[in-house]
Amino acid sequence: MKWFKKLLTLVALINLVVGPVAAQVRDQKQEVKPEDMRQVLESMGYKLKPDEAGKNVLIVDKEGKVVMEVPYADKSNLRKYSPKSMQRMMLEEMTRVKMASKGAWSHSVRSLPTESAIFFMAMGAVVAGQLVTNYSQNPVGMKQHMDHSMSPLGVFGFFTFMYSQGVTSNVLAMYIQNKNFQVLIPYLGMTVGAFLQTYLSSFVSDPNVKMCANSWIGAKKSASDEEAMEACEKAYEYFTTTKKIWEFAPGIVSMLVSSALAAVGQKVVEKTVLRITGVDIALWFAPGTMQLKGMRLLLVKGLQITAFVAIDALIMRKITYIWKNIFDGADFYDQNDRLNNLLNEMKASNWQKDEKALIHEVKDFREKMTNWRMTNMSAVYEAHQNWSESLQQLTSMYNTSYSVYQDVTEQIRTARFQNVETPMMSPILLAGVKAKDLADDRQHLYLTRPEFVVGPQLETAKDVALKIDSYLQQGDDKVFLYPAEKKSLKKAADLLRSEDQQKVLAGIRELNSMKESIYANNSSEDAIKVVQELWSILGDPVMPKGLGQGYFATYEKSPSTADKLKGTNYYRVTGAFQTPNITDYLVMQMICGPDAENGGRLVRNSLGYPSVFAPPQIAAANVDLFNCNAIGANLPSDQIYSREIQYQGKTYQGSIPYLLAAARPSVIGTADASNFEDWWKKKTEKQVMDAFKVYSEKYQTIVAQMVKGIFEPGKSVFNGAKGSITWSGIVGLWDKKQAKRNMEGGPIMNGGLNSSYQEMNIYLAMLEDLMKPSKEFNLDFSETLNKGPSIEVLKNVDAEFRKLETLLRRIKIVTVNKQEAVSSDLENYELEEQVQKIQTALNEVSKTLGVGEEDSAESAKMPKARRDLAVQVIEQLEALASEIMMYGSMANAVTWEKIRDMKRINSENNKFQNEIQKKVDQLRGVLGARH
């Protein structure tokens, strides 16, 4: 009878929970009498015996033994749960919650500066601890902390964190009365706050959300209304139907665990260290500077946040790994079934059915496979990204400096020993002015032979003059201009019509003066439109004030050199001057940079911040100190090229003439040979290589982890374990297919290379079915690791992928000084060449399927759905090859030579120089023919 007691107990518990909510005040006729239950119980073999004296009902079995007593309900208690009573209780609770919310909002607004400072210091303490204990994981942690804390999104996120954790803590404090659990309140509040901060920050920063919001508030759109609505749909799809919130589940679990651990730790600390420390530290300060209460707040709040964040950072990655393996690993079975079903549906319809669902599934599979590998190597990906950020400025500035310095020193050497006016020494008065009708293949002339584009530039200036004439000839009813504006435009037009570059430059300056004044003074609306249009016709004139300014402005925009400067970070103030352009910065560094010949440090590294490369000085060391030292307000950048510099008793008008005279012979070389390459390697590159030796020692452990992850042979014990711990495990008791899956775990391997081969074979199986259709496509993901294609053209693709693996196998883990390190003779260009071979093999597959060209005869015969699937699968194989190549590139990013890929850089530099020389020779030939 124990089971019956348990059943009745369960019914009673449900009644206790649900009954009061549904209870109503009934009159005596409506009340349920105990006798009403008799028929039900007697049908089960039990009898009811009301006991009016004892105010209960006895339930007896066939033998007359009492099995349960059910007391009568007290009418006064029932009335507590009437609809009116429930409404009153709910209003009271809502009022309390509202007050808690209002209090949290008020506190958040008033305490934002103080709480922000505490949070900033607490987070900083965590980051500092991570830098000391695990520097290799994130060498730029402090910079990321500073940037995020100072950004608008960071402030918004922190306010969200404060407010939501305040509301949660206040509400919990109203209901959690047990003192043993009250220590959890601030940490549970922080869990809610951190989740909302992360989710809302992700939501606000999403580009689709921004575009959608702009369409709602009526802001100017960069695209059509349809595109704005599409952005709204994409945002909804991303955050709702794709279950974006599910991605935060591991973080929530991690934070809950962190809350529990931090709460336990706090109870211990509060009893010992905190009490003593709070008093001792407060006594260090003079009376009145900081009260004990304030110091206590700092310590308690700071300790709580620090403990919460530190513990969460420690366990977050582990929990995420376990969570993702358990659930995502098993989800591949569902994707396996969907791909099979969708492909078979297309086959059954003779490829006449809409293919969008199938194409979407293939794309989704590719994305999930990429995310799967990233999850299994998340620590490595994160560390590599952090190291890339740490070294980005150093490597990009080094490469940029090398290119510009090489060009400048060669021009100085040519001018010094051959007495030739090089492009850098020519005025280039019309720098930035468009050359009319200049063909794309002649754009390099702006930089290499600026004198060749002067004629077309003068034609552009004349077009502007004609445009001004047309405006001035129109009446005020069409173009209204003040008399002074008409006078300025007339003066500019007269100057722009000239064949004299100096006069044209004066005309451009007249327009520029007008352009600057119309924003500062009361000008006509039409004047603003007219000047803007005229300026756009001209291009982007530089109006140089000194020698070299026009050349370096052109250097930044020329197609042949712009890519060398792109993406390089630099300081916007150097010495006494503003340096808004990277070429301005490099010119100043040539004069004021570290003296590498005399021990000046070119590579600087502060703990927690990116490494910085400071380009070296090439001029004589005894330059006028004013230029290299910031004294007072910074001067505008054009004075870099016009301000006088004293050197050896002579005065030079600007930096370029000074560099021509003062550049060191040890850098420039002689009339017979340049010395730049040798000097650069000994004085500059050597410092960078020495720095990278230190970096590589710290980065080696990360790369060793990555190589292990790439070649991991088996599966994690957590992979696909969902089936064993959820209801699907019960389903497996009578579903043999599900039972097999539960036993085997997820179908996709954890190792990067093995899972890549599985993905490759899945794509090849789909292509094979398109080439040689089967009655039913029934692919099992779990059996794809060693199951390759049977068609020759697909075998070639498989073989090229295997060669890529052979290259990766050359990256080996060795032990150096009792520490794991990576040894590799692999060059990055070898990986790129192999990927090209894979693409060639895939092109043959395209031809075989008839999808290589849209207008081919084979393509015309093929159903659109079948063709689209083939194209999509081939594209995914190309993306997969690039991903595998990336593993090798990341593992190779250990030494300075591998990062720079010196062989490839030298090859490209030689190719570039040959192309430029060829064009110059062609031009010389044209000029010779003309003469």
Image (tube, rainbow, N blue to C red):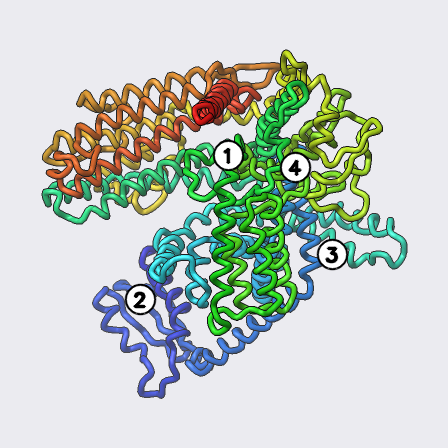
Whichever of callouts 4 and 2 sits on the residue coming sooner in the sequence is 2
Q: Tell me the SS state at disc 4.
A: loop
Whichever of callouts 2 and 3 sits on the residue coming sooner in the sequence is 2
Regarding residue 708, the answer to whether it shows in the image is no
Labels 4 & 2 near each other (Cβ < 8 A): no
Query: How many discs mark residues in the rendered view?
Result: 4
Camera-nearest label, 2 or 3: 3
Rendered-image quadrant of the N terminus: bottom left
Estimate the x, y position of residue 76 in percent, counting from the top left: 46, 82
Q: Is residue 616 left or right of residue 528?
A: right
Q: Label 3, on which residue? A: 297
Callout 3 amino acid: Leu
Q: Nearer the viewer, residue 805 or 643?
A: 643
Q: Label 2, on which residue? A: 60
Separation (CA) of disc 1 from disc 4: 46 Å
Q: Label 4, on which residue? A: 609
Q: Tell me the SS state at disc 3.
A: helix
Separation (CA) of disc 2 from disc 1: 113 Å
Separation (CA) of disc 3 from disc 1: 72 Å
Q: Residue at x 63, y 17 (%)?
A: 681
Above or below, comparing residue 586 to residue 43 in the picture = above
